[in-house]
Amino acid sequence: MDKFLIVGLGNPGNEYAHTRHNAGYMVLDAFAKASNIVFSDRRYGYVAECSLRGRKLILLKPTTFMNLSGNAVRYWLGKEHIDESRLLVIVDDIALPVGELRLKASGSNGGHNGLGHIQQLIGANYARLRIGIGHHFGVGRQIDYVLGDFDADEQPLLNEAIDTACQVIPAFVMEGVDRAMNRFNTRKRKTVITAEKKAEPETAPAPDTATTVKDKDNAKTPTSDV
């Protein structure tokens, strides 16, 4: 049976459950609920499995905390003997407007620490689905922003993005990344985010500080690198 690894990046713990940084977790939670499957606490992550027309899908929510996501991804690729071409990583992206999706076959980490660590361990030749969370923050506020909850007016856009992302997963598995990109990468302008968001001066995202969870990473991540 062909196997695929679908990874939703985020941070474990109730304090992070609804934050912008956990958009990847949210997608896998929604997909698992729709598939009537549940996650179990396994090595390096919460794992669930399901089948789709003869293909086996392994859903992974790493529990390494964001900055060491590569440990979980590399371990489960190796354990299940899955090639990187059958890996899809779902991740938040401050470079996209809230709720906008972008599927790519490969590429840079875009300043995202989770993707950066995965790239260090397995390279950049894997598909990633980016979910826009916007960058409505001032100077020095990026970490607070990504670790903050979505605003009420952002929630409809987030819900729509999650629903669409749950459609991208089977398209990636059944049709391949190129055809899935053609289907889902049509840019849609979102108008829900209002002028109030721009009251505080914005700055371009700083790649070297993007999406860092410093205190938690060192305290709770595994020391072994398998």
Image (spheres, grey):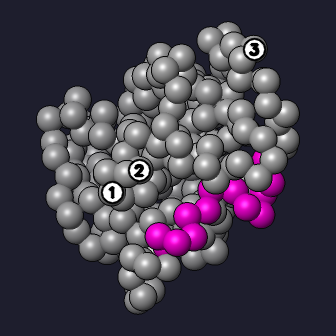
User: Could you classify mark 3 by the number of other residues whose Cα lies within 10 Å: few (under 14), some (14-19), or many (20 or more)?
Assistant: few
Q: Which residue is mark 1?
A: 13
Tell me which segment is drawn in magenta. Answer: 205-217
What number is the disc on residue 195? 3
Quadrant the C terminus occupies = bottom left
- Does 133 sit left or right of 95 as displayed? left
**Pointers 3 and 2 in contact (C-beta within 8 Å):** no
User: What residue type is disc 2 on?
Assistant: Tyr
Q: Quick one: SS at disc 2?
A: helix
Sequence-first tag of 3 and 2:
2
Mark yes or no: residue 118 visible. no
Question: What residue type is disc 1 on?
Answer: Gly
Q: What's the residue type where badge 3 is placed?
A: Ala
CA distance separating discs 1 and 2: 6 Å
Give how far apart the Cα atoms at labels 3 and 1 are.
33 Å
Image height of 2 relative to 120, above or below? above
Locate the N terminus and report the quarter of the image it occupies. Answer: bottom left
Residue appearing at x 52%, y 26% in the figure:
151
Answer whether labels 1 and 2 touch (C-beta < 8 Å). yes
Name of the residue lying farthest toward the bottom: 224
Image-based side of 184 in relation to 44, left or right: right
Left or right for 57, reference 143? left
